[in-house]
Image: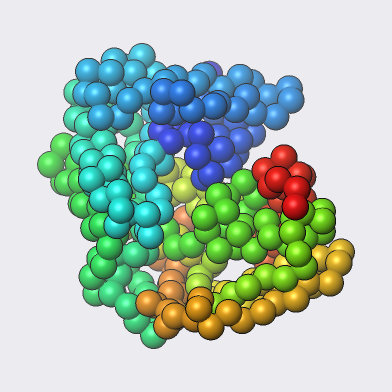
Amino acid sequence: MARRVLVTGAAGFVGRHLVGALVADGADVVAWRRPGEPGWSGDAGAPPVAWRDVELLDPAAVLAAVEDAGPAEVYHLAGAAHVGQSWSHNEVTLSVNVLGTHVLFEALRRVRPGARVLVPGSSTVYRQSTSPLDESSPLEPSSPYALSKLAQERLGVRAWLDDRQPVVVVRAFNHIGPGQSPSFFAPSFARQVAAIEAGLRPPVISVGNLDARRDLTDVRDTVRAYMALVARGVPGRVYNVCSSVAHGVGEILEGFVQRASVRVEVRVDPALLRPSDNPLVLGNGALLQRDTGWAPVVPFSRTLDDILDDWRARVTVEIPPL
């Protein structure tokens, strides 16, 4: 009998990739989404995914849904995911990420205390550093989002220490890939290039500071890491999920421009020039690799190819003609 797996936030960017990977791995997936969000049925011929509309801030609804699902594994991906937007939506960010996680753990404690749980935190909890960050690096959350993710991971560790719920916490660094919102820099660049190719905008991309460097992992490698941690991670332990390689923002843009089928001009706009708030974010993923054997396998060139091809397929319906 296939193992029953619950994925919260399953309709999001990472959630869709994770659901697909779990289905391919033979899991029986119960996928939660916010009421009104679209679902996804998986690949043709794959077993169906059981979608459920669950309001994470409703304790009674969450308890009933957890009891109905009866999961052996839980991937808690639901939450507010954008750092910049957390300043203008701080109440939503804190309530969904912190209170929502508390509600879920209370339900698990009552009806599924043995389920293995993964809580995806964020590298934004770390203090800025010019050196690779490992799990012992100093913490200094500097946004409402980062603060909410630190509180979320503490809830996960507490669930293990106090209730013996087998929880693994991750601090995920940047992950990119097809299907990501254009509010993030890599898909924003790809979307603009695809729109230029389609004749939907002038062949110019205006940019500001491109010097920042980020540790980037293909989202398909990220979900493989999550699955490896649920299978082999040590309960109560915090793990970085990262590639341990930093790429420049300018390098990402140049990669898309080189792949363009038409000439694209990159123009520096002085109005957009601002010092980077964090010139380098680089992780050390040695603990993850030691405990699980995971290593990234998707070539970075393929990641860029797939992001751009994804936007080529979507751009004509998402961007109005000039």
Q: Which of 245 and 236 is in front in this view?
A: 245
Q: Farthest residue to the right: give it.
A: 261
- Estimate the x, y position of residue 16 in percent, counting from the top left: 56, 38
Residue at point 35% right, 72% down? 134
The image quadrant that residue 274 belongs to is: bottom left
Q: Farthest residue to the front: give it.
A: 322
Relative to 278, residue 150 above or below? above
- Estimate the x, y position of residue 276 in percent, counting from the top left: 43, 79
Q: Can residue 193 be seen in this view?
A: yes
Residue at point 23% right, 45% down? 91
Relative to 148, residue 15 above or below? above
Q: In this view, does 311 lie to the left or right of 143?
A: right
Q: Which of 190 and 298 is in front in this view?
A: 190
> How many labels were placed on the picture?
0
- Estimate the x, y position of residue 149 in percent, counting from the top left: 29, 53
Q: Farthest residue to the left: give it.
A: 162
Q: Which of 29 and 116 is in front in this view?
A: 29
Q: Can residue 4 be seen in this view?
A: no
Q: Is residue 227 left or right of residue 70?
A: right
Q: In this view, does 150 lie to the left or right of 14?
A: left
Residue at point 30% right, 29% down? 56
- Estimate the x, y position of residue 219 in percent, counting from the top left: 57, 53
Residue at point 51% right, 19% down? 50
Q: In this view, does 277 lie to the left or right of 36?
A: left
Q: What scheme was used to colour the molecule?
A: rainbow
The image quadrant that residue 138 belongs to is: bottom left
